[in-house]
Image (tube, grey):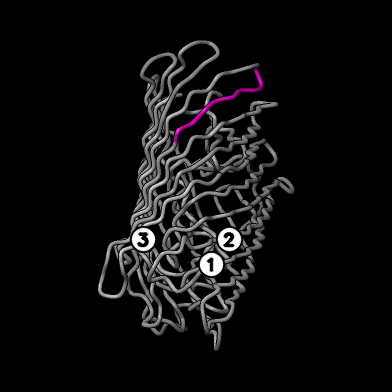
């Protein structure tokens, strides 16, 4: 069957359930948004947004399938003669969740295939495997471990969020404010965290996060940069009142870019202030000095390079998860990876998202993001900075276990590369899904 016919079939599959299925009432809080509130003792809130779940049982089997048709008017991320593309993604999903007295874990897998109408050389499989678990060592201490593996190619609508399995804070996140040319990307994120309450007013803890990202099947003119990140932090937090706490955090960050022979390390000490006016709201402020060391070894095209300096880093975040609405907002300035286009960068990022239940069955979401990635004067990289602005809007509707989604995103990107102008995108997607959760065992 030709690609054009397959794409038409995708559109037909999406349209039929939306037109034919009758309305059925649904509760707020689907199992796919069953994310617990952040621990009140941690200095940084979890960077996730969901409506509070109404589920009561502890053991669940989650399964379903989603079909998404996505359009990008500049699929290859070109500044001149952009090429549009229409893709169709089939994505079956399955997951298990279990809660016991000391353990709480979730295993999920999504694997499908994406077909491109015009760029059929990029047809590929989509893989998303995740495991997250928490073990209660004692009444006052917990250990959390998580791993997320994602393999994808290009833009596939709302399916790109492969980090959802691994809980993240404003500190341990990769540079997301960059759009790369179409290429196959494989990434893996691993997290290990421990929190221990020493007294009624003090807590200590730490975490280690490992992230690696690899590109292949790139365009001949594109040079995408693989990266590996190792991060470790340790904190002491003291509760001043039921709603406020202060603390100090030490953070180590190591970034490795093998293709450009670069190794960047960052050591920072941060003062933190956390405000929790209610259980569903977490506000965090942090700031402190950081020492940055950038090293590049000699190669056939570059000379040895060493740079060491001290600067400031900091940020703020807000997380609110309510029953009928949710929101996140954050600002950060720190050293990070270059998102595939650059090596180490100073990343300044501002973002906000709002999710709202519009009626019994309708949900809306709006997001805005602005990021500046300034290269740390690394040899072998021709681009000095990348500026990215993204506006995203989605609406969705639920009919019991059926779902329908419609989204649009506008992207402006200034790459500051000699001889190459800005690259802009209009992106749109439509999806239909069928998902269900079945309780296992007894209440």
Name the residue beneath numbered marker 3. Answer: 151
Q: Residues within 10 Å of mark 1 (few under 14, many from 20)?
A: many
Q: Nearer the viewer, mark 3 or mark 1?
A: 1
* Residue holding disc 2: 372
Residue 165 shows in this picture: yes
From what the image shows, is residue 241 above or below residue 233? above
Secondary structure mostly seen in magenta is strand
Q: Which mark is residue 385?
A: 1
Q: Which residues are magenta?
A: 242-250
* Sequence-earlier tag: 2 or 1: 2
Query: Which secondary structure lies at badge 3?
Result: strand
Where residue 242 sits, quadrant-wise, is top right
Q: Residue furthest bottom?
A: 81
**Mark 2–mark 1 contact, CB under 8 Å?**
yes
Decide which of tag 2 and tag 3 comes sooner along the chain: 3
- Quarter of the picture holding the N terminus: bottom left
Residue 433: x and y in percent read 52, 57
Q: Disc 2 and disc 3: Cα gap in Å?
A: 26 Å
Q: Is residue 138 left or right of residue 327?
A: left
Q: Secondary structure at mark 2?
A: strand
């Amino acid at each position: 069957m030709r690609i054009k016919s397959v794409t038409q079939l995708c559109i037909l599959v999406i349209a039929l359930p939306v037109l034919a299925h009758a309305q059925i009432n649904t509760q707020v809080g689907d199992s796919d948004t069953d994310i617990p509130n952040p621990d009140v003792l941690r200095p940084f809130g979890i960077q996730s947004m969901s409506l509070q779940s109404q589920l009561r049982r502890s053991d669940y089997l989650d399964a379903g399938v989603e079909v998404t048709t996505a359009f990008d008017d500049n699929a290859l991320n070109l500044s001149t003669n952009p090429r549009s593309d229409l893709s169709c993604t089939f994505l079956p999903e399955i997951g298990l969740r279990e809660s016991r007295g000391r353990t709480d874990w979730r295993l999920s897998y999504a694997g499908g295939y994406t077909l491109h109408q015009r760029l059929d050389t990029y047809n590929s499989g989509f893989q998303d495997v995740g495991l997250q678990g928490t073990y209660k060592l004692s009444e006052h201490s917990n250990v959390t471990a998580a791993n997320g593996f994602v393999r994808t190619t290009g833009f596939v609508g709302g399916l790109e969020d492969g980090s959802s399995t691994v809980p993240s804070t404003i500190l341990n996140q990769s540079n997301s404010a960059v759009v790369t040319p179409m290429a196959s990307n494989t990434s893996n994120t691993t997290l290990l965290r421990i929190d221990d309450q020493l007294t009624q007013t003090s807590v200590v803890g730490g975490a280690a996060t490992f992230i690696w990202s690899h590109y292949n099947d790139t365009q001949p003119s594109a040079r995408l940069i693989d990266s590996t990140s190792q991060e470790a932090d340790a904190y002491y937090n003291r509760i001043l009142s039921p709603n406020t706490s202060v603390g100090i955090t030490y953070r180590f960050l190591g970034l490795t870019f093998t293709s450009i022979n670069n190794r960047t390390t960052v050591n920072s000490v941060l003062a933190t202030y956390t405000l929790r006016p209610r259980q569903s709201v977490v506000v965090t402020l942090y700031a402190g000095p950081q020492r940055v060391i950038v090293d590049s070894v000699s190669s056939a095209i570059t000379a040895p390079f060493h740079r060491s300096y001290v600067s400031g880093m900091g940020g703020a975040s807000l997380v609110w998860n309510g029953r009928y609405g949710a929101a996140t907002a954050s600002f950060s300035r720190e050293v990070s990876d270059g998102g595939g286009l650059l090596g180490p960068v100073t990343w300044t990022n501002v973002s906000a998202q709002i999710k709202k239940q519009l009626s019994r069955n309708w949900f809306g979401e709006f997001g805005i993001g602005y990021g500046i990635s300034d290269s740390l004067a690394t040899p072998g990289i021709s681009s000095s900075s990348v500026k990215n602005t993204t506006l995203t809007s989605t609406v969705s509707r639920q009919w019991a276990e059926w779902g329908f989604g419609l989204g649009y995103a506008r992207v402006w990107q200034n790459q500051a590369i000699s001889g190459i102008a800005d690259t802009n995108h209009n992106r749109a997607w439509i999806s239909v899904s069928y998902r269900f959760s079945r309780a296992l065992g007894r209440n």
